[in-house]
Image (cartoon, rainbow, N blue to C red):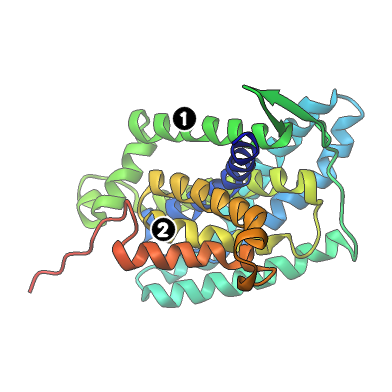
Amino acid sequence: MTHFLEVVLRGLGSGAIYALLALGFVIIYKSTGVISFAQPAMMLTGATITSYVGPALGVMLFAGFSFFASMAVAALLTAAFALVIERGAVRPMVGRPAFVVAIITIGIDIVVRVVTSGFIGLGARNIPNPWGLERVELAGLRVQERHLVSLATLAVVVAVLFWFYRYTRHGLAMRAAAFDQEAALTQGVSVGSVFALSWAMAGALAAVAGSLLAISAGVDRQIWIVALVALPAIILGGLDSLEGAVIGGLAIGVVESLVGTYQRDYAPWLGDNFAVVSPYVLMLLVLLAKPYGIFGTPEVRRV
């Protein structure tokens, strides 16, 4: 049982990164009605910035603080970059069909990833790991500190988002625009500003997720692929549900960890890499029962 719980806790640590990515997807979708496929590029950009800023700050600051400081810098710069992309490439497409804007974001993703890869090089850029691979004991369970850091970061982000959406003027404007854009416009809400803010927030979240992932994996040209695992998370939880994004991301992480640990012993006939596709299998199973995701809002058409 102890080993099982340790596997679950490890999965929650990975799931926290998926949840951060999923939150970015959902924030943009709730505000604009479009899935932004540029999130993998934002993740790669943020991780790359952290790999440059981290070593520079590490000389002046102690290890743990330098990582969080470099991650914060990366989040701010990536948010600004996402804002520029929204203003320059996405805003002119407002009013076009959603699939057209989605195709535009795919093009943005490819271009940004190609450019960013030039700053990475052929190998992987290391991000100083303040916690190493050491395990700590928590309630009798041994777990790597980086997983606890990921979970703690997710908890802080969720708390900040809860406060932002409930108690700030911009958060209330984003909720109003997500509910009914035309009604929000009549009440003086700047929908354009809502779109821009949603892109900036999603970019910052992608940078945080990329930085946390790169602690162990480093920053290479293929790190963006991890962002694709967030897609089953948002569909599982519901495209328009922030809480669904969090729960979906954590669930995907746990399932991936459990399958990767036990599948070879109990179901070897599924193949050696079944853990890679397990998030998509879980997504399909959920969609069979809940077509709009666990927390998604069913679409109602009046005729």
The local secondary structure at tag 1 comes to helix
Residue density around tag 1, few if under 14, some if 14–19, many if 20 or more, within 10 Å: few
Q: Which sits earlier in the primary sequence, circle 1 or circle 2?
A: 1
The local secondary structure at tag 2 comes to helix
- Outermost left residue: 303
Q: In which quadrant of the rendered view does residue 230 lie?
A: bottom right
Instruction: Estimate the spatial distance between the alpha carbons at disc 1 and disc 2, rounded to whole Å.
Output: 22 Å
Q: Is residue 140 left or right of residue 21?
A: right
Q: In which quadrant of the rendered view does residue 180 lie?
A: bottom left
Q: Which quadrant of the rendered structure holds the N terminus? A: top right
Which of these two is toward me, 157 or 232?
A: 232
Count of numbered tags: 2
Residue at point 60% right, 71% down?
270
Q: Is residue 143 left or right of residue 36?
A: right
Quickly name the residue at label 2.
Answer: 236
Residue density around tag 2, few if under 14, some if 14–19, many if 20 or more, within 10 Å: many
